[in-house]
Amino acid sequence: MRFRLRYLVVPLVVAALAAAVLWAIPADGYIYAPDRAKPLAAHVSVPGAHPTGAGDVYYVDAFIKRASLLERILPFTRPDGSTLVPADNYLPQGVSARERERQVVQEMVRSTEIAPAVALSALGHNVHARATGVLVIGVIGGTPAVGKLQEGDVIVAVDGKPVRMPLELRAAIGRHRPGQRVRITVRRGDKTLRMTVGTVSVKEQPGRPIVGIQVDQAAKIELPVDVKIDIGRVGGPSAGLPFALEIARQLGRNVTHGCKVAATGELALDGSVLPVGAIKQKTIGVRRAGASIFLVPVGDNNAADARANAHGLRILAVNSFQQALRALAAHPPKC
């Protein structure tokens, strides 16, 4: 009996040790896992706030971590609802993990500046906000932008035509074919520089040209009231839409109708709602929080992916903050 038991225990010990080793070895990929949506009320402060009715606006994020070799080999070891993505989907070539972490923190900071401007302007307040160009927040290794553009540059024109918004930059570059060169004008400190930069195709979209940069909105913003937003260590720009909705709620707009209203989406200065990542995980996180409705961006299949993972959760796809306000008024959530 002891002899047989030894033959059972030894393989189990070896398997456990092998699993521990594979768990400790990082793989070439990242795991996106759901995080439960959370209410914003305690994290947003608006002078003169007078919220209408009950209900809360929720924001949602996703856990992102480096995958282990075990998780790459054995999918059942990954968290429920997670997705394994290639490393360069999260960490572009030539960008270190520390640099990426710093970028997402700065994206959140800019989101806390743009969301109040969009919300207050939509509610009729006197906001002075002007897009000044497209801010370069990162250069992707191995692309034509390396050695030409650099972090902190503000792109103000493409092919001699002004650009002020990230979508305008994407459209201007998109008029070219991959392999063609574009003329870019940038503001670097006190200098204005003109350069010609090549393009390459996007791996996932072979016909779409890029120069190889990560961008955000550059703007000058003056608000009539001092809105404060702080959600701790959460990074990235995807809480822009819920920030704006919570500001509207605190200033008396009935956006929740007594329910839990969740949202995700990066806000541009003109109120456009831009696509975000990890939409599957965010939809699951909203479901787990028991929200009545989830507002998501229309673009980059965000709406389709959210609906595919809704399982009864009502999905409302929007192109702009103004559209979100109108849709919530015309078709209020039911809880």
Image: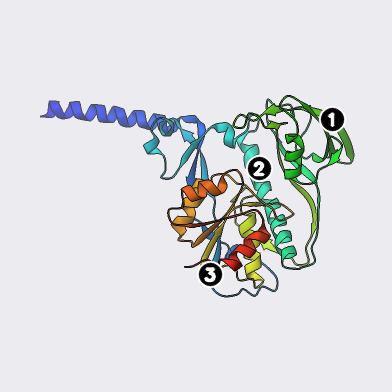
The residue wearing badge 1 is 195
State whether residue 221 is above or below residue 81.
below
Q: CA distance from mark 3 to mark 1?
A: 52 Å
Disc 2 element: helix
Which quarter of the figure has residue 248? bottom right
Q: Residue furthest right?
A: 191
Q: Residue at x 62, y 38 (%)?
A: 98
Binning the other alpha carbons within 10 Å of mark 1 as few (below 14), some (14 to 19) or many (20 upward) gives few
Which of pointers 3 and 1 lies earlier in the amino acid sequence?
3
The residue wearing badge 3 is 55
In this view, the mark in front (2 or 3): 3
Q: Nearer the viewer, residue 42 or 62?
A: 62
Which quarter of the figure has residue 161? top right
Task: Report whether residue 75 is seen.
Answer: yes
Q: CA distance from mark 2 to mark 3?
A: 34 Å
Q: Residue at x 63, y 56 (%)?
A: 241
Q: Residue at x 25, y 27 (%)?
A: 11
The residue wearing badge 2 is 102
Q: CA distance from mark 2 to mark 1?
A: 27 Å
Which quarter of the figure has residue 328? bottom right
State the image coordinates of residue 81 (x, y, percent, origin top left).
43, 45
Disc 3 element: loop
Q: Nearer the viewer, residue 73 or 255?
A: 255
Which three-letter amino acid code belongs to the residue tagged 3?
Gly
Which of pointers 2 and 1 lies earlier in the amino acid sequence?
2
In this view, the mark in front (2 or 1): 1
State whether residue 39 is above or below residue 65.
below
